[in-house]
Amino acid sequence: MKTLIETTPSNPPTDHDGTVQNRVSGSELAQKFHLSHSPSNVFRHLAPTHKDYWKDRLEHRSYEYKGKLFEMTEYCVRLQHLGKRSYFGLDTSDKEVASAKARDIYVFLTANGWDATSEKFKPKTASQNKLTIGDYLAAVQGTAKLRDRTFLNYTNCFRSILAGVFGIKDSPTKFDYRTGGNQKWRARIDSIRLEKLTPPLVEKWMKRFVTNAGGASPAAIASAKRTANSYVRCARSLFSTALLKEASIKCLALPSPLPFAGVDLFEAGSSKYISKINVKTLVGAARRELKPKEPNVYKVFLLGLFAGMRKAEIDLCEWQMLDWANCIIRLEETEYLRLKTADSAGEITVDKEVLAELRTFKPASKSDFIVDSVVEWGAGFKKRTHVRQPRPDSARQYYRCEPAFDRLNEWLRGKGITANKPLHELRKEIGALIATEHGIFAAQTFLRHSDITTTARHYADHKARISVGLGKYLKSSLVVVKQKAKRQAG
């Protein structure tokens, strides 16, 4: 019989009104999933008033949800007194602390009885849980485990889900960052109690999101599913195991279950990159049209296509990162550049012809960065210039070379690249070419993916054309038919 056990820090699932779903006893689950919870005899010689007596009597409560067995990380203990038994949650995954709490509850129970003990030690019900979205997000931010931009991205996705679940419609004031409209919109969402967001409501929102955004087009539906999946992935990262272990989070009265416990993502279909680019033609056009008149845009093109660099990496790549002799770009974190992951750092090998092109722009550059960020407007004596400086402390994503990126996207669309992010399409193209020419692991190394599955999902051998050569039989059969017809005619 198949046994499936998953571990989650959340408690048993409840409906939005606090009603427990599918909760069963530990013994029933043990019997169903063939698990054993029998204690050993290590501490049986100790008295119940000794904390070590309880170490071997601690349990992890379990519950069944969607046919799977989930086990909570926090300990609990089951006490028996005067013919009555009951579980007590200990709100800790530390065995020493849990055993001491179990001892204290037992001592209090024997002295004061069930009513007083339940009043003091039983966890609050869901209706008593006053923890708001804003309270929780403030605690997460206080852990300093997430970069400001990462935290902002996660919270934006989380609030978008909440707005959809609870019918908080978007309005122009949502995007009013100057006079407080956005703050009011966030405050309305942050005032919602965390317990109100349950897994069934999240899944209901996901289905409604796809229905509303997808329409009848299969491509639109697949795109909506990928977007919903992305929102959920980002939002549930705010409830990761690493964050829940933080002291400032552990002390909170978190609801049961947590909002994304057991939520399944959509099967969004294939996300494999399908090349529609004639690289030879595109490179020739860029050299003719961009290099003489728009050198900054041309430099972005070179780094995006031939080095497969991400937008933020291009924006803050410095001349000193170029190793001219070895044809290498050494990407590393700097005062300004914050790489996506630890694996994003590394050496990018590029063709010598590419570095030769970049070298032609070096003498005229007055910046430490490869791509200049000078913005010009006006003409004649009214001509003005402004240098867009990096903003590494900005919580929102900021690109000093945004005008050059916008111009390249416009140019690429004019060449028939219709993707939502034409610049990123260049990175996909070089990834597909390398995967075809040198294999998937070479593509992973070049693109600096931390997980090979990411490379395989998007960049596997898409340029390869595979055929077993059966077409030759069409030709030979046609010859036979012609010969037969000729004999019949003769």
Image: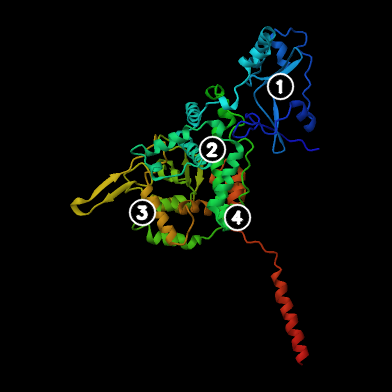
Q: Which residue is mark 1?
A: 59
Using a 10 Å C-alpha cutoff, classify the residue at mark 1 as few (fewer than 14 neighbours), some (14 to 19) or many (20 or more): many
Circle nearer the N terminus (1, 3): 1
Front-most of residues 324 and 220: 220
As measured in the structure, the alpha-carbon distance from the residue carrying label 1 to the one carrying label 2 is 30 Å
As measured in the structure, the alpha-carbon distance from the residue carrying label 4 to the one carrying label 3 is 31 Å
Which quadrant does the N terminus fall into? top right
As measured in the structure, the alpha-carbon distance from the residue carrying label 2 to the one carrying label 4 is 35 Å
Going by the image, does 284 lie left or right of 372? right
Say whether marks 2 and 3 touch (CB < 8 Å).
no
Identify which amino acid the numbered label 4 is placed on.
Answer: Thr
Going by the image, does 341 lie left or right of 365? right
Q: Which residue is mark 3?
A: 295
Identify which amino acid the numbered label 3 is placed on.
Answer: Pro
Circle nearer the N terminus (4, 3): 3
Circle nearer the N terminus (2, 4): 2
**Mark on residue 436?**
4
Q: Which residue is mark 2?
A: 235
Most extreme residue toward the left is 381
Local SS, label 2 = helix
Residue that appears at 70% across and 64% down: 468
Q: Position of residue 166 (x, y in %)?
A: 52, 40
Most extreme residue toward the right is 1
Q: Quadrant of residue 8?
A: top right
Closer to the observer: label 1 or label 3? 1
Circle nearer the N terminus (2, 3): 2
Using a 10 Å C-alpha cutoff, classify the residue at mark 3 as few (fewer than 14 neighbours), some (14 to 19) or many (20 or more): some
